[in-house]
Image (cartoon, helix red, strand yellow):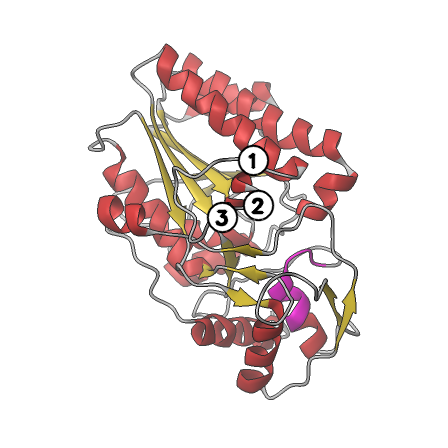
Amino acid sequence: MITGGLGYIGSHICADFIKPEYEIVVIDNLSNSSIDVIERIRTITNQVFKFYEADVRDKKKLRELFDTYNFSSVIHLAGLKSVSESVQSPIEYYNNNVNGTLSLLEVMEENKCYEFIFSSSATVYGTPDSLPIRENHKVSPNNPYGKGKLMCEEILNDLTLSNPKWKIGILRYFNPIGAHPSGLIGENPKGTPNNLLPYVTMVAYGELKCVHVFGDDYPTPDGTGVRDYIHVVDLAKAHVLMLEKLSSLKEPINIFNIGTGKGFSVLEIISTFERISGKEIRYKIVPRRLGDVAECYADPSLANMHLGWYAENTLEEMILSTCGWMENKKQL
């Protein structure tokens, strides 16, 4: 089972998991995704898969699906994902992200399905004491989105202490960008995007007026926030490797950073996009957002060592694939 499987990250994971050795069942409540993604994934893979419109908080529906399918594992991506929105709507975020995870785990345990891969986030680290960020660094999230992810991680840790049958993989994503090389799937948020690159892209293609750069007074080389941007295709591959390796890993719970190990500032992203696309990106400096940190990039060496996973795509390749997706989206 893949929850949230029609979303930006989920759709790329589905495309990577549709192989003879896997039968996937996707659930998604379509709150930030589109039903037509199913056909695009099928075009990419030339394969069909089962889809159900459902919310992970709906235990009745989950129980029906577990009765129908003999799931061996679950990859859990469903959830709300905006740091700034979480600051404005914390109850909604805790209800969706924490309660949704609890409902899913309860039904899994009832059905003796003990393999679980959890979509976590670098936001659990909060403001890092040092860089690059390693998995054993202090966790101190400074926004409800990150706090909810950490709550879920703590629940998962308690679960493995209560029952040794659980095998859990936690992937702490840094900043996914880019799109599938086919140009058929990519980031397509409903309404105004919360993430930087889709915002830059929509400005480049005339759908928005200008990029709001939140703060230019951070202690970084150009004053704007620095983040570790990871190609979504590389991120998807990490999930395949995690599932392949999970049963052989020694620990019941395994946490890995999924990032490139290098940070780029907001202005570097804008200038690189301008250079590659040939399009002017208008931007405006506005005050900092609550919950943002100055600089955040990963040490991915544990994922390299234990999963055999490496980030392969450069920033230029991430942006090129995004442009390909935007050009192709006009025809979809």
Predominant SS of the magenta segment: helix
C-alpha gap between disc 3 and disc 2: 27 Å
State how far apart marks 1 and 2 are (Cα).
7 Å
The residue indicated by pointer 2 is: 127
Foreground: disc 3 or disc 2 = 2
State if disc 2 and disc 1 touch (CB < 8 Å). yes
User: Residue at 64% of width from left, 66% of height from top?
Assistant: 224
* Mark identifier at residue 123: none
Quarter occupied by the C terminus: bottom right
Q: Is residue 191 left or right of residue 264?
A: right
Direction from residue 168 to residue 7 in the image, left or right: right
Position above or below: 330 against 5: below
Please say whether residue 141 is visible from this viewpoint: yes
Residue 187, position in %: x, y? 58, 60
Task: Please tell me whether mark 3 sits on a helix, a strand or a loop.
Answer: helix
| Residue 200 versus residue 62 in the image, above or below | below
Q: Dot 1, how many residues are within 10 Å of its Cα: few (below 14), some (14-19), or many (20+)?
A: some
Q: Quadrant of the N terminus?
A: top left
Q: Mark 1 — residue?
A: 140
Q: Of circles 1 and 3, which is in front? A: 1
Amino acid, disc 1: Ser
Question: Could you tell whether 144 is left or right of 259 in the image?
Answer: right
Residue 234, by quadrant, is: bottom left
Q: Which residues are magenta?
A: 193-201
